[in-house]
Amino acid sequence: MKAIVYHGKEDMRVESVPDPGLQSSTDVLLRVERTAICGSDLHLWHLDSPLGTDGFVVGHEFLGTVEDVGHGVATIAKGDRVLVSCTIGCGRCASCRRGVYSGCSTASQGGTVTNVFGFSPVYNGGQAEAVRVPFADVNCFKVPEALSDDQCLFLTDILPTGFMGTELAEVGAGDRVVVFGCGPVGTFAQRCAQVRGAAQVIAVDPDAGRLARAAARGCEPIDPSREDVVARVLELTGGAGVDAAIEAVGRAELVAQAAMVTRAGGRVAVIGVILAPIEVPWPIFFNKNLSVRTGLVNPQVYIPHLLPLIESGRLDPTEIISHRLPLADGRRAYEMFAAHRDNVLKVVLTP
Ligand SMILES: [Zn+2]
Ligand SMILES: [Zn+2]
């Protein structure tokens, strides 16, 4: 089959690789119909593999039709159209039973962040014509008849991630919220804050195109390349600061800015991916009694809450799709996404 294979820094290649097969009785084999490139795939693009390996299939956002089913799978059948959680849980270990599938001790096989599709040879990813899905009863979710593939694709990762930002920051009715980042995850964090009844959503991003999209969604835009973010947020909130700040980029200085613009007793959520130790102005968090929460997403927890919001039309995840390309153009798609070329926001690939 054809797949996008990681070979090191800025080296993703569309190649022929062996077809995947079932390896365990709890696996299913999925024929991929849609897949997307994520900002976290760019960590692989920009850096050498965090796990020091190459030659694996990338991609953790995909959906498709079930082609083969292990005899231990109870709830998923051949022919089902399913979306798949990017983080793989076993459903039975202590972490999974607490709903922290990302910390699954069984699926991680002892590694760190190894239980995500497409980041290591442990689980090949879904930017491919087919993919093996372990613990299918836990990680596959049937796509409702009435919804399209495009409406459900982002439930695999970035929509639950954006929603998790608003959960961790406890965004509620009447809150003033700032979201750092207007990429796909930031966009969904802004949308989810609005759905939860935020009175004001402030969006920060230096990309003019992305900032204009945020303004069109009803956010108050701040361009950090032209304005003092802290002063401007305080101005927009009448000097009070926001109730909740969501960092959706993954940069230490934005975590610091989040603390500076949040009112005493407020909440800061960090959903951007930060892979190295960072320095933060801890006295600000301490003196202002700020709560800080972070973590890798558990789509399994949020998908049941988000599907009805899509079905009712209150969330339209397709709004972020800016480009559609065949899987065969995968390398070009990575180059475009990495360079922010052509006002790209989200690239969907079709095998
Ligand atoms: Zn992703
Ligand atoms: Zn588990």
Image (cartoon, rainbow, N blue to C red):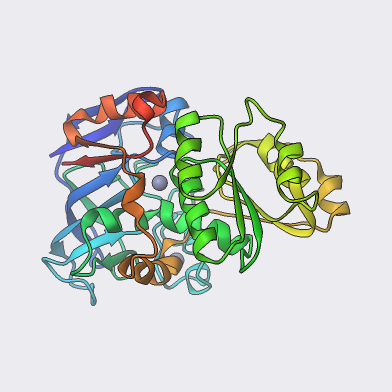
| In this picture, residue 7 sits left or right of residue 24 | right
Please provide percent x and percent y for residue 130. Answer: 17, 48
| Above or below, comparing residue 219 to residue 29 in the picture | above
Q: Quadrant of residue 155?
A: bottom left
Location of the C terminus by quadrant is top left
Q: How many marks?
A: 0
Location of the N terminus by quadrant is top left
| In this picture, residue 117 sits left or right of residue 104 | left
Q: Nearer the viewer, residue 15 or 284?
A: 284
Q: Residue at x 47, y 63 (%)?
A: 101
Q: Residue at x 40, y 27 (%)?
A: 338
| In this picture, residue 327 sits left or right of residue 117 | left
| Above or below, comparing residue 321 to residue 192 in the picture | above
Q: Quadrant of residue 107?
A: bottom left
| In this picture, residue 10 sits left or right of residue 274 | left
| Residue with the most extreme bottom position | 74
User: Residue 24: in sight, yes or no?
Assistant: yes
Please provide percent x and percent y for residue 99. Answer: 50, 70
Please provide percent x and percent y for residue 192. Answer: 49, 59
User: Residue 52: in sight, yes or no?
Assistant: no
Q: Nearer the viewer, residue 169 or 39?
A: 169
Q: Residue at x 69, y 42 (%)?
A: 255
Please provide percent x and percent y for residue 287. Answer: 88, 53
Q: Nearer the viewer, residue 267 or 172?
A: 172
